[in-house]
Image (cartoon, grey):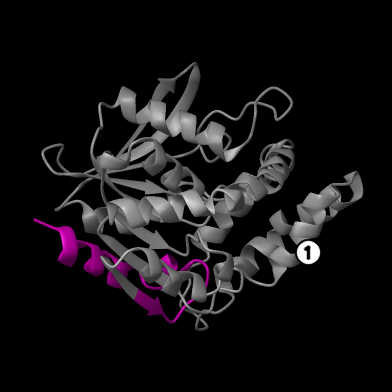
Amino acid sequence: MQYKTIDVEGLSTFYRECGSKDKPVMLLLHGTATSSYMFRNLMPLLANDFHVIAPDYIGCGNSAAPQHSKFQYTYEHLTDYVDALLEELRVEKFYMYVFDDGAPIGFGLARRHPYNILGIVSQNANIYDEGLGPEWNDRKQYWKKPTKELREKYKAIFSPDSIKSQYLTGEKAGSVSPDGYAMDIYNSQKDPDYLERQSDLLVDYQNNIKNYPEYQNFLRKHHPDMIVAWGRNDPRYIYPGALAYQRDDSDVDIHLLNGGHFVLESHCDEIATLICSKWGK
C-alpha cells in the first residue's frame, strides 16, 4: 500500500494506491462524511487483480479542505476534482466502487465519460427515489425552506453519537470495529469548518436527486456490468433502492447482505470475493 498526495488544480489531494499498474483500475469512492480510510481492509484484498486507487475528496480526510466560504462544496464541483485527479494519473478506463454520497460523484463521472466505465460496484449508493429512507422526507422540507435554524439542527447528523450509530445500526453486535467511526469522528472535529462543508453538501444533495433520471438513463443506455452489494438493514438508503437497479440494467448482480449502511465493515471479505470472482484476472 502506498499513500500519496498530488496537486490537483492547485489543491493537495491525498490518495491510497495498491496493486500493479498493469492491472485494470478500480476506483474506490467514499461517502462525503467519510474518507478513503473506509477502504483500508478492502484494498489489499483487491490488489492481486486490480490497480486500486482510493482518493480523499477535497474537504475530506487528508486532502486539502478550503473554507466553505471560499470553495463551492457541491457534488458537481467535487466530481470536477476527481475527474481532474484521474487525468493527472492518466487513468482513462476504470471500474468504480461507489458508496453513499460517492454515488453522485461516481455517476457524475459516468455521465461525463460513459465509455470509460468498465463496471460498477454499488454499496449502499442510491440513485432511486424508492431507496430513500424515511429521514429524507424531513430533509426535503428543509430544502424547500432552508432556514438558518434548520441548518444548525441538521449538523447533529455529524455528531459523534450519530456517526457511531450510522456504523452500528443494522449490524450484529461485535461485528464492526470501532476504527472506522473513530476516524470519522476525529475528522469531523479536527477542523471547525467541517460542519459547514457538510451542511453545504446536505443542501446540494437535492440536486443529486434531481439527477437520478440521468443516472438511470446511463444504465439503460450503456448497461454496465454491475455488482450491487447492499446492507439490507440500512435505514438511510433502504434496500428497495438496491432492487431498483435491475429495472434499468439487466447486467446487475444484486446481493442483500445482513448489515447496515457501512456493511463493508462487517462483510469486507464477502464483498471482495464478489468483485474478484466477477472481474478478477
Q: Which residue is mark 1?
A: 138
Residue at image point 52% right, 54% down: 212
- Amino acid type at circle 1 is Asp
Residue 172 position in % (x across, y down) = 50, 83
Q: Is residue 279 magenta?
A: yes
Residue segment shown in magenta: 255-281
Classify 10 Å Cα crowding around label 1: few (below 14), some (14-19), many (20 and above). few
Q: Nearer the viewer, residue 263 or 218?
A: 218
Instruction: Using the image, determine if residue 244 lies above or below residue 94.
Output: below
Residue 277's quadrant in the figure?
Answer: bottom left
Q: Is residue 278 magenta?
A: yes
Residue 247's quadrant in the figure?
Answer: bottom left
Tell me, yes or no, if residue 38 can be seen here: no
Instruction: Using the image, determine if residue 1 lies above or below residue 250.
Output: above
Q: Nearer the viewer, residue 159 or 218?
A: 218
Say left or right for 20 vs 255.
left
